[in-house]
Amino acid sequence: MKKLTGMKCIMFVLIAFVGLGIEVVLAFFIEPILYGSSMNNWNTFESILHWILTCISWGLTGHFIVNLSKKKYGFDLIKRGDKVRKWKWFLIIVFIIMSLIISYIDWNGLKLLKELNYNGLLKFIFQYIYYTFEVMLITLILIFGQKAFEEWFNNVNIPYGGIILAITWGVAHFFTKDILTGIITIISSFAFGSIYLLVNRDIRKTYLVLWIMFVL
């Protein structure tokens, strides 16, 4: 079994980030040619097809990372962490509440209801399936970013994963969305990194909390 070094962890970070970038290629280059219109003008079927194609590509990327890291390097992502203490759960709840407040201000209401009203039930369902796959990849960026810097600096108390997430997934939103979304995403990245440490690096708990913060 080969050693999972810091550079190899960064390789997995880049694979996950490139996996996220597949959507950009689909949305801005391939699909406009296929549909004959830009993303803003897609009909319901075209939007749903976009989310399905994106989820397939993200699912394959995540499956590749999880399997390769375990088979080649013995890094079991699904391994459960230690029991989370009550004071940590309190901080996690604080993060969730803060995230909900920021989201409410940004959306001028509850994001969940706003997107349901805007998209209608069918598009809403597929969009939230899409979010589920996106959270999977940002969780992987977070985990391997954290692992890389822990290998290099032997410090397990700094949320390095959140920093890496901010300069990859976070910064990317400045180019694919707008400045405000980019800022919010970077702030969220730092929060996600802290969550990962608070749940004792348990990917199940990390994913669940991140999903709640992400979709609400």
Image (cartoon, rainbow, N blue to C red):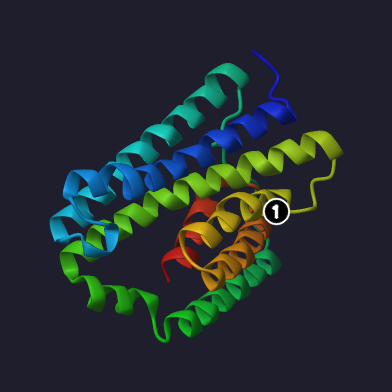
**Residue at 50%, 68% in the rendered image:** 178
In the rendered view of the protein, which quadrant contains the N terminus?
top right
The image quadrant that residue 56 belongs to is: top left
**Residue at 44%, 36% in the rendered image:** 62
- Relative horizontal placement of residue 170, taking residue 39 as reference (left or right): right
Q: Amino acid at mark 1?
A: Ile
For residue 129, above or below residue 154: below
Observer-nearest of 71 and 13: 13
**Residue at 50%, 85% in the rendered image:** 105
Report x, y in % for residue 45. 14, 55
**Residue at 70%, 44% in the rendered image:** 146
Report x, y in % for residue 47. 22, 56
Number of labels in the image equals 1
The image quadrant that residue 198 belongs to is: bottom right
- Relative horizontal placement of residue 171, taking residue 214 as reference (left or right): right
Q: Residue furthest top?
A: 1
In the rendered view of the protein, which quadrant contains the C terminus?
bottom left
- Relative horizontal placement of residue 77, taking residue 39 as reference (left or right): right
- Relative horizontal placement of residue 126, taking residue 99 as reference (left or right): left
Mark 1, residue position: 163
Report x, y in % for residue 85. 68, 61
For residue 64, above or below residue 165: above
For residue 191, above or below residue 59: below
For mark 1, give the secondary structure.
helix
Report x, y in % for residue 128. 32, 60
Q: Label 1 neighbourhood size at 10 Å, few (<14), some (14-19), many (20+)? A: many
